[in-house]
Image (cartoon, grey):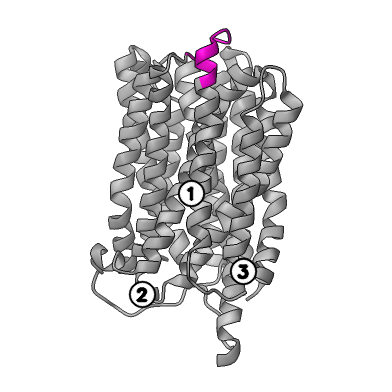
Amino acid sequence: MKISSLIFYGLLGLPLAMAALPVYVQIPNYYTAQLGLPLASTGLVLFFARMFDTVQDPFIGQIIDKLGCSNRIWIFVSAALLCLTFAGLWLPPAFARNSNTSLLIWLGVMLSLAYTAHSMLNIAYLAWGSSLESQGTSNSDQQAASYHQLLGASAWREAFGMLGVIVASIIPSWIILQDKSSTETQLVQYAMGFAALVLAAVVALLFGAVKPLQRGAHAIIALRILLKNPRFVALLRIYFFNSLSVAIPASLILFFINDRIQTPEKTALFLSSYFIAGACGLPLWIKLAKRIGAQRSWQLGMLIAVLSFVSASMLGAGDANAFLLVCIASGFALGADLALPPVLLTVLVDDKQNMGAYFGLWSLVGKFTLALAGLSLSLLALLSYQANQVNQASGLMALTFTYAVLPCAFKLIALFLLRHFSKSTPS
């Protein structure tokens, strides 16, 4: 497969990532610290919006299997909806800012629509990537060649994704720190730039990327059939605990920087170093997976993540340099979390006709962990933590436990399950 085709495929990972992880990181802080919403009620809105998103993903995956992952109307409609809702999240209109209730309703509606659009586009995108099987190879080489090709597609997708989160981590953080009189104009420009990136990436995917293999017509598979695959269920279980270990600190990192490390002016540095480390580490994880397999490589990534968050739990006010090292180490481990699990899933599933359904359930699990992570804000409120209050010993202890210690426990559970995951994959 030509490298240009893989690049054109991977480009859509950039705007999709801009609308995913950074939004989960930045929107809660933006609506509470900047727009003045209460922490507890914002956490509940995040939870219910993410639960709505979780429930719909398997059905979206089934529709994609029916229509085909390269259906142009589906891709253009979902891309347009994503652009509109992305702008709506950052630019709530004046009538929505009249009261906390109105703003909470606006946040809930925009999040739900943004999640729907992202799922429509992302599940089709993942199913497209899983269909990039090797052609023209001998039977003896087919399995290894397909595996390496899947790794290549995943590498370009996640590399552009890392670039997307770097851009989306730096720009909004910089805008929010500027004079408030110019914030709205800059956010408008940011939303317009995002829409231009989405359009360019969609055009590249549809007209420049290698086409997915066409599948014959088939009936929509029942979700219960997917859950009868014990190895798929075992991998879902691992993915659940690992995703939860990533989602919780992603939801709380801005609060940790502001109130525990107490260096909000370095937010862009911390976030960008985290994602740059992930981008730099990504080719190393792919290379390692080709040598020792995706499963063993992912285990190593989990160990690095645990060590980094244990270190974070020991930090306090002024430990900016130490926290920067934590961001770099955990970002490096993030590359394994992003690139390797979809490869394991694709290799595990023999039923390529229904990859959209499988990725729909896969996405459901990831979204469910994000919904649970949204409740961490409400949990902190119950534990007497208040944002922007640095002289609250018990609240800061609760923040440290929830941000650093709890994710380590979930990551260790995922590591234990992965070590016992009995599925041979080519290396």
Task: State the image coordinates of residue 299 (x, y, percent, origin top left).
Answer: 59, 57
| First of labels 2, 3 by sequence position | 3
State the image coordinates of residue 57 (x, y, percent, origin top left).
Answer: 33, 52
The amino acid beneath tag 3 is Gly
Q: Is residue 78 above or below residue 346?
A: above
Q: Residue at x 35, y 45 (%)?
A: 116
- Front-lying residue, 412 or 62: 412
Q: Quadrant of the N terminus?
A: bottom right
According to the image, label 3 marks what residue?
293
Residue type for callout 2: Gln
Disc 2 designates what residue? 353
Q: Which residues are magenta?
A: 386-397
* Kind of residue at badge 1: Ile
Q: Position of residue 241 (x, y in %)?
A: 45, 48
Asked which quadrant contains residue 3, the reply is bottom right
What's the residue at 56%, 70% (across, down)?
A: 150
Q: Is residue 355 visible?
A: no
Cα gap from disc 2 to disc 3, whole angstroms: 25 Å
Q: Residue at x 66, y 39 (%)?
A: 308
The CA distance from mark 2 to mark 1 is 32 Å
How many C-alpha atoms fall within 10 Å of the one at disc 3: few (<14), some, or many (≥20)?
some
User: Which residue is labeled 1 in the image?
Assistant: 413
